[in-house]
Image: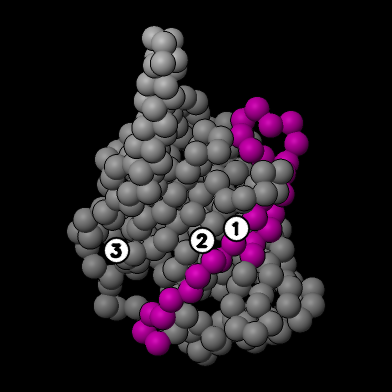
Amino acid sequence: MNLWVKIVVIVIAVIAALFLIGWIGLQVQPAPFKPFAQKSSAQMKYVPLPAGLPAPVERFYRKVYGDQIPVIDSVVITGVGSVRPFGPINFPARFRFTHIAGQGYRHYIEATFFGFPVFQVNERYVNGSSRFEIPVAGVVENDPKVNAGANLGMWSESLWFPAIFLTDTRVHWEAVDDQTAILVVPFENTPEHYVVRFDPQTSLVTLFEVMRYHGAESTAKTLWLNEAQQWRQENGKPAMQTGAAIWMDDGKPWAIFDAQEVIYNADVKEFIMAKGE
């Protein structure tokens, strides 16, 4: 074997080893963030399940809550998952999402390699204005299209606490058929409309569908899907465990979030304006 052949073999071996190391590093799931400092409020208020809901919507709420709907003012969701911000590579991730229900949110996401953070996403949507700090893209602040997308993100994530779709007086449901309904949510002067799909066997939500801008540079909206992939038991009732976000022009999840801890009605007024976990 001459020198050049040996060099080629070594180069191929090194490249293969690097790919293997990279693949292994992307299989290591990070530990979730430490538990949130506050616990769920023990003084939960309830309101009766309203009459006149579309059939699949009523079945869903009776399955998830029964005939009494909790009044949820804030939620902190902590968990793990994966994100795919730069094309085909899925990075393991951990996250903490903080919501003032129906009003605003803050996201903190760490994408990891071998369980260690390699980049962070800090973003929030408060008082109708968004601020995104994203690697490569930098800071995008209070852009009208991004604000519209952030509002949809907020309402989509509210499937982790769907009581808000009944207790917020700005929100209402419209009938379609026995497995579909329209969810109407507020945004500035023009309401947004989700098509919501329900599983005929379990009565649980399977999909939220809505048209959304990819970002500030988008010239048209794209169909955006939020898939409820897994439900868990919480106090003997089903609650969403895992959700995935999919752009229709991509066709596969760009983010999957699996909730490990959900805290209700904590005081998050200052935390929602902070950074980090």
Q: Residue at x 52, y 33 (%)?
A: 86
Q: What stretch is highlighted in magenta?
A: 207-236
- Please say whether residue 210 is one of the residues in the magenta stretch: yes
Measured Cα–Cα span from mark 1 to mark 3: 26 Å
Measured Cα–Cα span from mark 2 to mark 1: 7 Å
Q: Which amino acid does the dot numbered 1 rest on?
A: Asn
Quadrant of the snapshot with the N terminus: top left
Question: Within 10 angstroms of label 1, few (less than 14), some, or many (20 or more) residues?
Answer: many
Question: Within 10 angstroms of label 2, few (less than 14), some, or many (20 or more) residues?
Answer: many
Q: Determine whether label 2 and label 1 are within 8 Å by CB.
A: yes
Residue identifier under label 1: 226
* Residue 169 vertical position relative to residue 151 in the rendered view, above or below: below
Q: Which amino acid does the dot numbered 3 rest on?
A: Ala
Does residue 264 appear anywhere in the picture? yes
Residue identifier under label 3: 266
Q: Which amino acid does the dot numbered 2 rest on?
A: Gly
- 85 relative to 207 in the view: left or right: left
Q: Residue at x 34, y 78 (%)?
A: 44
Query: Between tags 1 and 3, which lies in front?
Result: 1
Does residue 96 appear anywhere in the picture? no
Q: How has the structure been colored for display?
A: one colour
* Earlier residue among tags 2 and 1: 1
Q: Residue at x 54, y 86 (%)?
A: 63
x then y, percent, for residue 264: 34, 68
Q: Which of 236 and 188 is in front in this view?
A: 236
Measured Cα–Cα span from mark 3 to mark 2: 23 Å
